[in-house]
Amino acid sequence: GTGTIVRYNTFYSKGSGQSAVDIVGTGPITFNNNIIVHSSSANIYRCGAGSLAGYSGNNNVFDGTSAVSLCGNSLVGWRTATGDDANTLETDPLFVNAAAGNFYLQPTSPACSIGGGYAGAYPCETTNNNPVAVISADPTSGLALLLVSFSAAGSSDPDGDPLNYAWNFGD
């Protein structure tokens, strides 16, 4: 595109045979602070003829699940060809729980401190939020030697972390 700025996006594709981002047309195009997770052997970037003229990019994170290919180049080859993406990383961005659709970044994510800010569409988790415990009992009253079933099935964790349950009745 002409004068296109692509910044603070998360591209997540576990498909195959498709490029994650098509760079077509003539520049300028600025591609900064994005995260691309792409498990295919296809290009992360696929470039049209003459489309690198005016490209500028930096502080991106490319998941290296499969070999990163940027218009047919490795990240090092891409840097040499374009002179860009000096601070771009090829690593796991450490999402909180991508499989469940939670693309927030874990506090230890390398994308949390790239280029003096962060990369991607979602900010970094800075704290671990407490889970919400929901407990039920059935029945809730009756005569002595009452058999009661307890459940924590309604409990959840706002960060998407797995929950563990331990019952302690003090006896």
Image (tube, helix red, strand yellow):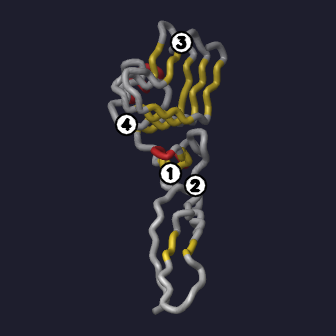
Could you tell me the amino acid type at mark 1? Val
Q: Marks 1 and 2: CB-CB under 8 Å?
A: yes
Q: Earlier in the sequence, mark 3 or mark 4?
A: 3
Residue shown at 61%/47% (left/top)? 123
Residue shown at 64%/13% (left/top)? 2
Q: Residue furthest front?
A: 143
* Element assignment for label 3: loop
Q: Earlier in the sequence, mark 1 or mark 2?
A: 1
Instruction: Determine which quarter of the picture holds residue 16.
Output: top left
Along the horizontal axis of the image, is 152 left or right of 74? right
**Disc 3 residue crowd, few under 14, some 14–19, many 20+, Cα 10 Å:** some
Image coordinates for residue 151, horizontal then vertical, percent: 51, 70
How many marks on residues?
4
Could you tell me the amino acid type at mark 2? Glu
Residue under label 3: 24
Quadrant of image for the N terminus: top right
Q: Marks 3 and 4: CB-CB under 8 Å?
A: no
Along the horizontal axis of the image, is 102 left or right of 43? right
Residue under label 4: 64
Residue shown at 57%/86% (left/top)? 142
Could you tell me the amino acid type at mark 4? Gly
Residue under label 2: 125
Residue shown at 57%/16% (left/top)? 54
Image coordinates for residue 58, horizontal then vertical, percent: 53, 32
Q: Nearer the viewer, residue 101 or 72?
A: 101
* Element assignment for label 2: loop
Could you tell me the amino acid type at mark 3? Val
Along the horizontal axis of the image, is 37 left or right of 121? left
Residue under label 1: 96
